[in-house]
Amino acid sequence: MRWVKQAAEALDGAIVRAQRGDADAFRALYRDAQPRLLRYLHALVGDDAEDVASETWLQVTRDLAGFTGDYDGFRGWIATIARHRAMDQLRRHARRPPAIPVPVETLAGRPAGDDTAEGAIETVSTGAALALIATLPADQAEAVLLRTVLGLDARSAAAVLGKRPGAVRTAAYRGLRTLAARLEQAGHPEQAGKGQLGGVAKAGVTHLRELTLKDMR
Amino acid sequence: MNTRHPSRISRKAAGQLLDGAAGSSVAAGPEAREQLARVLAAAAAPGRPDELTGEQMAVAAFQAHHLDPDATPQRGQMIKSPLVRFLTGKILIASLAVGATGGVALAATTGTFSGSGSAQASPGVTASGGPLAPTPNPTVTDPFATPSPAVSASASPAASASASASASASASASAAVDLPKTAAGLCEALVSDVASGGTNASASATLSTSAKEKALASGAVGQLLGGSSEFSSLTATAQGNVAVPDLCALLLDLPQLPQPGDLAKLPSSVLAAVPASELTSVITTLPSSTLSAVLDALPVSTVSSVLTNLSSSGLSQVLTALPASSLSQILTELPTSVVSQLLGELPTSALSQLLSGLPSSVLSVLPTSLLSQLGL
């Protein structure tokens, strides 16, 4: 795991260099953090994720000089900014449902119609995984995404969400328990009807469409 | 009998999964828990090139802020029109490869990440295998792990452009030397040259946005491009001098250029690379002459996709705006089934008006069911 530590330390240094105006350092931060942000934001604002992420980076650019902390702290900081901007976006488009984040047929990383759940799970794609997580209630989905995709610990995720760490641990735990149950259903269609991963994702899209500003509070 | 009890996942196991540190202990657990670990690892898999299409714009905003803090775009200004969004996504990344800004930019055109090898490119199957979680992806930090001295602090954009091209993906690796002269850097130099009458290549960042736009709109751009090999890579990227101002306007994040109407100036090969869904979203905004030129330049398959993606009102608007010659060409080139589908979406009155101006040679290739419907 030494390389992991070195990588984290390299981005720790990148923060300091970016604060001095080093564009390459900023670029390195962007390349690591932007995919995380986009995946998190997709669960919040759907197709507006790119726009909200752009606004987030603008604010990061403006406020970076005042940031203190390491790269772990940086991820928490930008997640907080991104969440605020996402809430702004949801206010602007009050109760407008997010667009479908991932085409259903791409969810399992294989052609639509191939409903072999075991195989789909074996080769689960990032899009499929995110769509599955998005099937969770909003608080659970956010907790899981902040903990896994943003790589935040429970305390940092709680700070982003404005909740207690215990509440975030519970939400994430419940989320994982639900995901495990759904995966089991997907793996056993004879017990769960046509509950393939794609089917779960379809349900998730429906669920995600119901995400509103209220869910984020 | 089902012996799996994944939903009985313990809090401790959940914490381990979330921390991504459980590794083998999770892999040894029940099957569904392994699947859960895979799902979490996939969610945190390394960034894909299509997730980094806004990089150049973000970096440009960062550079602009550090050169002139007051010039940082305000919130909302980074929300791009469909045109700018697809151009930045599909075309600029290709241009970045010319400027050799780094492995990820290069990867955006090839579909693979370079630099750190394939070991990190595939998402891991254990909870700790997803490089996004919970620690940084080594792929993206590679430039820092192996700083390259390949780019010297050259004063000449042309010299450094060739240096960075030969240095390939490692060109942007060094944080200690000058910023690599990317396509954006060449554009800055071009703008600066134009603004100063070709006598001074000092930083164009001191120019206001409007001054940069004015410089790019100037006829001097063509002269500079034609008179110097300095900008040859820009010309090559834009596939000709004409599209260079648009390319630079996008690279420099200028708000005014290009207008949708300038689509027609872009080379057909560039247009063809644009996703049909994006073209569809801008095509109804084009003036008639541009619309005609754009549709003429596109491959038949793209035209087919664009037109079939349009709403029936949008389709009606586009088809009626086309000159008869262009419409004839499109109707005769498209497969009969597509023509039938397209025209079938139009109200009879609009269809009748549309077809009345066409020569009989075109009408003869149309589906007979349509013609009989119109009494033709």
Image: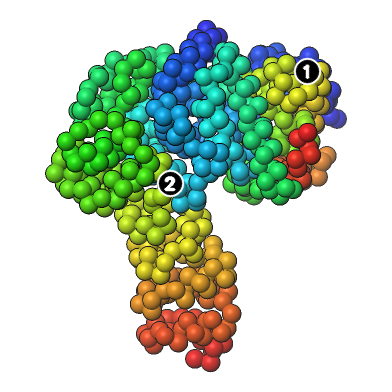
Q: Nearer the viewer, residue A94 or A4?
A: A94
- State whether residue A209 is above or below residue B125: below
Label 2 is placed on what type of residue? Pro
Q: Nearer the viewer, residue B213 or B302?
A: B213
Q: In the image, what residue occupies the spot 46% across and 23% down?
A: A26
**A153 horizontally vs B237: left or right:** right
Q: Which residue is outermost to the top?
A: A2
Under circle 2, the secondary element is loop
Q: Which residue is outermost to the left?
A: B227
Label 1 is placed on what type of residue? Pro
Quarter holding residue A44: top right
**B97 horizontally vs A67: left or right:** left
Q: Nearer the viewer, residue A143 or B154?
A: B154
- State whether residue B344 is above or below residue A47: below
Under circle 1, the secondary element is helix
Chain bearing tag 2 is B
Residue B133 at least partly seen = no
Q: Nearer the viewer, residue B332 or A80?
A: A80
Quarter holding residue A41: top right
**A139 horizontally vs B145: left or right:** right
- State whether residue B83 is above or below residue A141: below
- Quarter of the N terminus of chain B within the rendering: top right
Please name the residue that numbered disc 1 is placed on.
Answer: A165
Query: Residue B94 appears at what percent x and percent y?
Result: 36, 40
Query: Residue B126 appears at what percent x and percent y?
Result: 63, 20
Please name the residue that numbered disc 2 is placed on.
Answer: B255
Q: In the image, what residue occupies the spot 47% across and 76% down?
A: B320
